[in-house]
Image (spheres, rainbow, N blue to C red):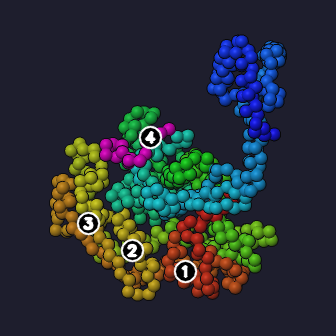
Amino acid sequence: MCKPNSSSTEKENDSSKTSSNPHSNKSQEASASVRKRRGKRDKAPIYSSPNQKWNETQLRHIKKSQSKLRKKHKNDEPSGGIESLLPSFIALAVIACGFAAKMGFRGRANVAGIDLGTTNSVICVQEQAKGVGNIECIPDPLTNSPIIPSVISFLDPHDSNNAHPSKKKVPTSFELDPHPSQVIVGSAAKVRIDTHPHHTLYNAKRILGRPCSDDVVHEFRQEVEYEVSCVPPQSSQGENLELEDSHSNIIFRVPFHSTNPQSHETIDKISLKPQNVGSYIINHLMEITKNYLQHDNVKSAVIAIPAKFDQFQRAATVRAFRNAGVSVARVLEEPVAAALAYGLQKKDGVNYIMVYDFGGGTLDVSILHVSDGGYVEVMGSDGDNSLGGVDFDVAVAHSLLDSHGGDIIVERVGYILKEMEKKLLEEGGEEDMEELLALQCERLEQSPLCTLSSFHTIGEKMKISLSSVTGKGGTVNGTCYGISERVDATPETISDLCSLLEPMELTFTSEQYNEACEHLYERAMFPIRRILKDLNLDTEEIDEVVMVGGSTRMPQIQDMVKIELAVKSLNTRIDPDLTVAYGAASVID
């Protein structure tokens, strides 16, 4: 209760006591000093009532009781503080985790969906959530695109200029030799196809797990400039590549100066198997994923493989992942992954799905059956293992070589380069001719030399431009540097060679493109007819058609599939290059 007059009353009592007490001055000083000390902590004396103070006897009794209590409990554990709150904090954390789990949160992503393709590769991760979470395909920081060219190029340590600008040689938990720091992957490697055709490997998946006797291998060796051998080399330098199986004894040999770890002798070339190329690509995919997500929890992958891969090709694919230190959580067939990407198994009235997968190296056509409960089963597959987007590049390149006299120019450039390299070696030089050209001939930064590799690169660019043109009237141009037939002597230096280069203008029209690729269009429809006949199905029974693979972007292919199946629309909503990896990521447990 508030006593507004209590202070005045106390003052009156104090004044009366002071006047009657002979020791009032000393008593006042002592009282004032005590109150001043307590005033530092803003404490007031304890009263039993507003108008009464405790006497000294009562205060001595209270202090004596407090002293006894201190002695009695001096060995007791202290109570209170943050320690007493820890059990409560732990309980709250457990409740929060349980609530998050009920809502679907399951922590960081630790499994990826990967499509290791012939021309491009993709890695996607699923945000951990109840059911299917948000799926994100990881972009390459160099291009900001999730579509990574399946190309690798080796930096020869013999050349001091070949220091990778963004990689350091750090220990790895897996075996890749040479170390990934000496290998460029993706878009940066693809640029080197023109400048370093013997150091750069591409389209390796096309012969993955195949024997050397396969016709596809024979055709492959005619279309690339890097060395493809069919027996393990037993070189004089002591190099010996042990093969994991006797079925596929294909190796690539690349210029790369190093020391044999056993004999300590110098070797000037290294040997790799096709799956080793895949391992470097997978390692790159995992690295960009770790940097993008800012954690390294992703250690395993759901992988997708062509439906027509045999046991040797499947085994070689799995080895490529293991060599890169990635465990394979599950293997999906690519058509199943594509169907899952669109969620067609959940759509009412869908019984039969056709997946038309036309990638860079192969064509696969599969028919899936959706049973009760949404289970997807591959009923059958057909395709063409030697037909892909690269064959359209080859068709354009061959047409350019035939119609522009390009074959003669390519042959002349190749001859002069070999003669110059031979002379360089005779004089004791150890520099790589391709590296010298890239460093000393500035003109080649604008356009490449006229070589077989550059004609394929030009052919790919022309294909991309002309395949988007419907009808007639489209025209594209390209340029490469050749050497005139008037030059009959081998140039002495790189500078002399550069001064002799003349631009060769290449022109290609949409009519020429369609004519060059007409036989490929027709081949692309054969698997559809065969699979329907084999499964005794009519076109009317196909409920959905999913288009997968970069080659399905060509409007000519889309129109022909519509006509062949008598359908009005196709499933093309998801980028055809991302569909398979997207579907693989969607089934992560």
* Element class at badge 2: helix
Q: Kindly identify the amino acid type of the residue bearing the numbered disc 2.
A: Met
User: Marks 3 and 1: which is nearer the front?
Assistant: 1
The residue sitting at 73% across, 52% down in the picture is 100
| Quadrant hosting residue 490 | bottom left
User: Marks 2 and 4: which is nearer the front?
Assistant: 4
Q: How crowded is the residue under tag 2: few (<14 C-alpha within 10 Å), some, or many (20+)?
A: many
Pointer 2 with pointer 4, Cβ within 8 A: no
Question: In terms of sequence position, does the residue under pointer 4 or pointer 1 come before the other?
Answer: 4
The residue sitting at 50% across, 80% down in the picture is 555
Q: Which residue is mark 2?
A: 462
The residue sitting at 34% across, 46% down in the picture is 162
Q: Kindly identify the amino acid type of the residue bearing the numbered disc 3.
A: Tyr
Relative to the observer, which residue lies in front, 356 or 424?
Answer: 356
State left or right for residue 135 relative to residue 85.
Answer: left
Relative to the observer, which residue lies in front, 366 or 7?
Answer: 7
The residue sitting at 59% across, 60% down in the picture is 136
Q: How crowded is the residue under tag 3: few (<14 C-alpha within 10 Å), some, or many (20+)?
A: many
Question: In terms of sequence position, does the residue under pointer 3 or pointer 1 come before the other?
Answer: 3
What are the residue bounds of the magenta stretch? 155-171
Q: Which residue is mark 1?
A: 558
Question: In terms of sequence position, does the residue under pointer 1 or pointer 2 come before the other?
Answer: 2
Residue 219 appearing in the image: yes
Q: Which residue is mark 3?
A: 481
Pointer 4 with pointer 1, Cβ within 8 A: no
Q: Kindly identify the amino acid type of the residue bearing the numbered disc 4.
A: Lys
Task: Estimate the x, y position of residue 132 in percent, counting from the top left.
Answer: 69, 62
In magenta stretch: residue 28: no
Q: How crowded is the residue under tag 4: few (<14 C-alpha within 10 Å), some, or many (20+)?
A: few
* Element class at badge 1: helix
Q: Which residue is mark 4?
A: 169
